[in-house]
Image: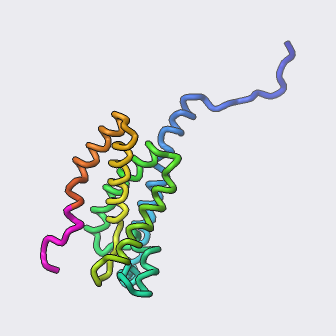
Amino acid sequence: MQPRLFLYFSPMPEIEEKKRKFTFLLLPSLFIALLWVVFGVEFLFSLDFAEYAVEPRTLNGLFGILVFPLIHGSIEHIAGNTVSLFVLLVTVRYIFPQLFFRVLLFSYFVPGIITWFIGRPAYHLGASGMIYTLVVFIFISGVIRVNRYLLALSMLVVFMYGSLFWGIFPLEEG
């Protein structure tokens, strides 16, 4: 046997496995970080980005379709959306990695388009539309695919986020 002039080091399999385990957290974390950066800029510089939100059936409101999920009205608003959105994005990224970008784009733009057509005349902002869309996607995916694990996840999502749908309806004046 001839001695080797150099040694070839390959990564240990367990290190590679650990790296792969948490890659599904990266994109959802970056999106949540983007939400907080936008909110931080608005807060630190005393800006009001609400004027860039979706204003239904107006020409200016069309631009809001591009940015309204990134704009939040208060710390409570963004904090409330952060946990739900992160959990749902991680779930979609983990279970449906090949569909993640399509689902993300759909949940980002479609609520804004629908709001622009049917929303009440006011500024609409926040990532709540994305949350509703992701909940519906996960639920319908579980039902359509008739997979017991996805069905269980669907029921868990409905149990955890079912009360979100009451937020669609105005319960008090104003």
Quarter assignment of residue 165: bottom left
- Residue 131 location, x and y as percent? 34, 59
Residue 40 in view: no
Residues in magenta, as a range: 166-174
Tell me the residue at 37%/84% (across/down). Answer: 57
Quarter assignment of residue 151: top left
- Residue 88 location, x and y as percent? 36, 52
- Taking the view exactly as shown, the residue that stands out farthest to the right is 2
Residue nearest the observer in this picture, 98 or 32: 98
Horizontally, residue 144 falls left or right of residue 7, namely left
Tell me the residue at 41%/83% (across/down). Answer: 61
Please, which colouring scheme is shown? rainbow
Quarter in which the C terminus is drawn: bottom left
Quarter in which the N terminus is drawn: top right
Residue nearest the observer in this picture, 65 or 148: 148
Tell me the residue at 34%/43% (across/down). Answer: 143
- Residue 91 location, x and y as percent? 39, 47
Magenta region includes residue 2 = no
- Taking the view exactly as shown, the residue that stands out farthest to the left is 172
Taken as a whole, is the magenta stretch helix, strand or loop? Answer: loop
Magenta region includes residue 172 = yes
- Residue 36 location, x and y as percent? 40, 66
Residue nearest the observer in this picture, 169 or 72: 169
Horizontally, residue 174 falls left or right of residue 102, namely left
